[in-house]
Amino acid sequence: MTINQHIEEFHGLPVTDFRTAEAEGKKLPAAAATAWRIGLDYEEEREFGEVWAAFLKTVALEEVTALVLGPWFSEEPESLSGVLPTVLAAADRFPALRALFIGDIIAEECEISWIQMCEITPVFAAFPQLEELVVRGTDGDYDGKDPLSLKPVKHEKLKALRFEAGGLPGSVIRSVAACDFPALEKLELWLGVDNYGGDWTMEDLGPFLSGANLPSLTYLGLQNAEQQDRIAALVAQAPVVPRLTGLALSLGALTDEGAAALLEGQPLTHLKKLDLRHHYLTEGMRKRLRDALPGVEIDLSQAGDPNDNWRYVAVSE
């Protein structure tokens, strides 16, 4: 996936942009047959609340299973705090909702580091049947207020959680670790860089590497980090790995050093998928990985120059 194009599929469903379909007079698909995207175009004359209200009046909400929130602003970035209460106020009208993507906003509309978020804790209480949540962006407003935040919560149904960021705050990572998610099977954290708010530490990753508080976890992504080699070395010894079917160490500055640590650590032959895309591995190391893990689907796309001293993560600004 990329942050340069709007998602075309979410929660196993094709995405329909409600505003576009409405403007073009297209026949709308059945409510349960698509993931509904609600967002504003650049210089949109209407406010988000108006588009949201039109959606509520038009679609059979009781059948909607997936929602995608696009830009809630039409020009300069604005905080999610201005519209999230509006969305959550209608939560009881979405009894079938199972998936929510907050921030399907591409770089052309707003750099990921400029997407102004807020506290998302109320989302979990509003949608107790939610199974998948994706949150893109972390920034607060221009005064540095109201950035992405989360208080530890318990949610019985959540199976997949992904935070996409150019820099994921350590406070958010620690809160995720303190949450009670007994059904969570897939967790992906785009860790990012310090320049864009990624003040996390290796110690913050410890709870996910142990897996002690995530009894159902089978897919772990610790991605988009400059220190991807150090993370790989930790993963090589991590107690959670034997029960994983998928592992993602992609989008970061992984080199032969980190890949060697993986191969020299505990067995990975039980994995179904190993995602290492956007890396700085030599061809020799790529061959070693393929030879050592013949039954594993390994994504080694987006290769960077191993001799380049300037190694960068895939998503920062």
Image: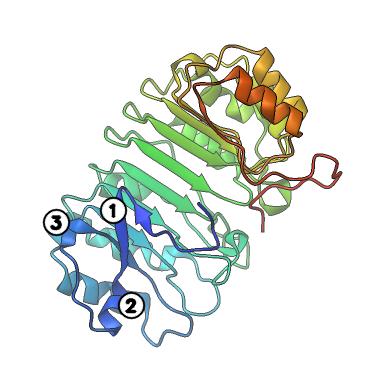
Query: Residue 185: horizontal and vertical position, in percent?
Result: 37, 30
- Identify which residue is drawn at 61% across, 41% down: 277
Label 3 residue SS: helix
Label 1 residue SS: strand
Residue where numbered disc 2 is placed: 20
Q: Is residue 254 positioned above or below 251 on the image? A: above
Q: How is the image coloured?
A: rainbow
Mark 2 and mark 3 lie on one chain; the one further toward the N terminus is 2
Looking at the rendered structure, the kind of residue marked 1 is: Leu
Q: Horizontal placement of 155 versus 299: left or right?
A: left
Looking at the rendered structure, the kind of residue marked 2 is: Thr
Rounded to the nearest angstrom, the CA distance separating label 2 from label 3 is: 21 Å
Q: Of circles 3 and 1, which is in front? A: 1
Label 2 residue SS: helix
Residue where numbered disc 1 is placed: 13
Q: How crowded is mark 1: few (under 14 residues within 10 Å), some or many (20 or more)?
A: some
Mark number displayed over residue 63:
3
Residue toward you, 248 or 175: 248
Query: Residue 306: horizontal and vertical position, in percent?
Result: 80, 39
Residue toward you, 227 or 81: 227
Rounded to the nearest angstrom, the CA distance separating label 3 from label 1 is: 13 Å
Query: Residue 160: horizontal and vertical position, in percent?
Result: 38, 38
Count of numbered labels shown in the rendering:
3
Q: Of circles 2 and 3, which is in front? A: 2
- Identify which residue is drawn at 51% across, 71% down: 78
Q: Horizontal placement of 19 versus 163: left or right?
A: left
Query: Residue 295: horizontal and vertical position, in percent?
Result: 49, 21
Looking at the rendered structure, the kind of residue marked 3 is: Glu
Q: Do the residues labelled 3 and 1 touch (CB within 8 Å)?
A: no
Residue 49 falls in image quadrant: bottom left
